[in-house]
Image: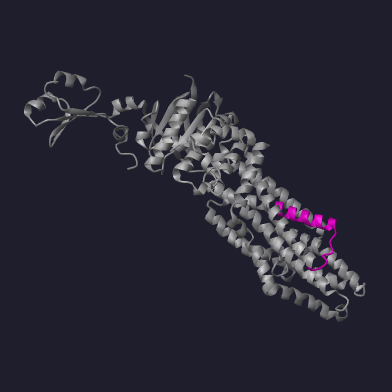
Amino acid sequence: MTNAISVNNLTKKYDSFTAVNGISFEVKEGELFAFLGENGAGKSTTINMLCTILEKTSGDVRVFGHELSKEDDEIRKLIGIVFQNSVLDKKLTVGENLMTRGAYYGLNKKQIKTRLEPYMDDFEIGEIWNRKYEKLSGGQRRRVDIVRALINEPRILFLDEPTTGLDPKSRRIVWDYIRKLKDEKKLTIFLTTHYMEETADADEVKILEHGNIIASGTPAELKSRFASSKLIWYTDRAMSKEDIIKGYEWSYDADHYNIKFNGSITELLYRNSKVITDYEVIKGTMDDVFLNLTGREIGA
Amino acid sequence: MKMYIGLTKRNLLVYFKDKQAIIFSLLASIIVFALYMLFLKGTFIDAIDTVLDRAPMLRDRINASDLDTLTGLILLTGIVGSAMITVPFNCLQTVVNDRENNVDRDILATPVKRWQIVLSYFTASGLSAMIMNGIILSIGLIALKMSGDIHMGPAGIIKTYLVVALGCLSSTALFMMIVPFFRSSSACGAFFGILSAVSGFIIGAYIPISQFSDKVQTVCNVFPASHVTILLRSTLLNGVLTDIDKSIGGIDNGAFTDSIRDIFTFRASMFGQKLMLSQMSIYVMAVFVLSLVTMMILYSKRYKK
């Protein structure tokens, strides 16, 4: 896979405050790349620089081979962005919003309508075409925001906390659309979020804190490195049983042992298959990863 | 070009789709009209009567309908003059709202050039002001025409619309320099309230500027809008004053119409010096060009974050 984005030592400073501190990473074409971090970690600042909205202080960035700050116009043609807050005009209808935005890319009416055609049914845009944007529900607005971001047929879609403020049902619907775009259109997706579970499908996750990348990898790698899994063994408490789990961090609650482990527990289960009969294994979560890395839960 | 037109169209839609904003942008003009109905017309007539009292023999020579047209056109000048200030500013609040709601980021991430973004805000605001003022002017002229002769030929009418266009563009250019300094729409709205209240005084819609002291006149005439209003007044009233002059038949050597021109301010005064119409036009053009240059410098800095 070729690189959609290559970032080398990217920095953004505001006077004495460093919002992004010399970060480096690569986004492969067609992958779902996620930036995870609290508010103020530097996620949106990074996206705004990559999208040519903010000027970088220093560093080398290439988007599909085009150099940031030198070939910004070329980059702008290749990107689509769904911002954290809706940026469409509330008094205009969905149709008016999309038609005017399409014109920003030099498209005429016919071209815009042709490009929107696939989304009229898929994203259910047709039925809300003549409705004012301000009259739409949160989920409908996000759908329109996503379609707006796709109007120029971008090769990479930036999603800056796309589900913040949405109810769980709308979040699920929005994610169904995003997965569809990734799977069917092979779109590269650059996501920033502070919802841990949203990174579960990511091909690569970077965790940001105070403008620095403090960990990276696939969700599975991060969980295996930074989150403990848990074996719950339903049994009576007995000294002999505690000998078996010696060497592990464990506790006993009511009717079961909680045994923390990193990596694999298969060998322990295999060796003691006659004793450990009623059990369940709970894998570590991205919440655990973040908690272990930063010492606090996200949003806390 | 398509991008610039698209963005301009969007800015126009944002203004014209907000009916409340349209009404508020015309608030100063509505107030001028309401005050005219309440007492301003009486004040204008009293001022004309004062002149006629000095030369009673002119009373019978001047057509009463010409005096009605005269006061009506002075009112129309006040209404249009106020709208030339308030409509462009109200439309330019889009710049502040876009910044506050991060809409400008959505635009900045598209291939639309930075200068096209600035120019589209300017164009949309100027066009909105021209459309609104064009409608007001047309309604006013039609209403006055229906109640009497306005003594204006096609050339005079075209000239009037051109003066209004100049006024709209010069106000827009001036306000383009001011709006980037507002960080929130509420601050901008508060300023707009003050502007609506003050605009009528600056252009002499309530009290003719000539009634003020030299210093106050100079302050009022710093604003190109007051010069444009004077140009508009001169263009609109020229026909009816010429007709009154003809009716009088030259027995006062034009003293009556000269007095009317003095009272209702047909020449701007700056630092005690009366300016010619050509000098006023040059002043407005100079401020317009200066504002355009400053606007491009200001916005290029603003978009480099």
Q: Residue at x 84, y 70 (%)?
A: B258
Q: Determine whether B113 is above or below A247 in the image.
A: below
In-front residue for pair B128/A27: B128
Q: Is residue A112 visible?
A: yes
Q: Residue at x 53, y 51 (%)?
A: B183
Magenta region's main secondary structure? helix
Question: Within the magenta stretch, is there residue B265?
Answer: no
Where does the image place residue A75, in percent across and percent down from the top left? 56, 29
Q: Is residue A232 left or right of residue A196?
A: left
Where does the image place residue B43, in percent across and percent down from the top left? 72, 75
The image quadrant that residue A197 belongs to is: top left
Q: Is residue B184 left or right of residue B236?
A: left
The image quadrant that residue B270 belongs to is: bottom right
Where does the image place residue A283, in percent across and percent down from the top left? 26, 29
Q: Determine whether B29 is above or below A218 in the image.
A: below
In the picture, the quarter occupied by the C terminus of chain A is: top left
Q: Residue at x 75, y 51 (%)?
A: B286
Q: Is residue A107 visible?
A: no
Question: Within the magenta stretch, is there residue B153?
Answer: yes
Give the magenta-colored segment's residue range.
B147-170
Where does the image place residue A194, in percent across and percent down from the top left? 38, 38
Q: Determine whether B89 is above or below A105 in the image.
A: below
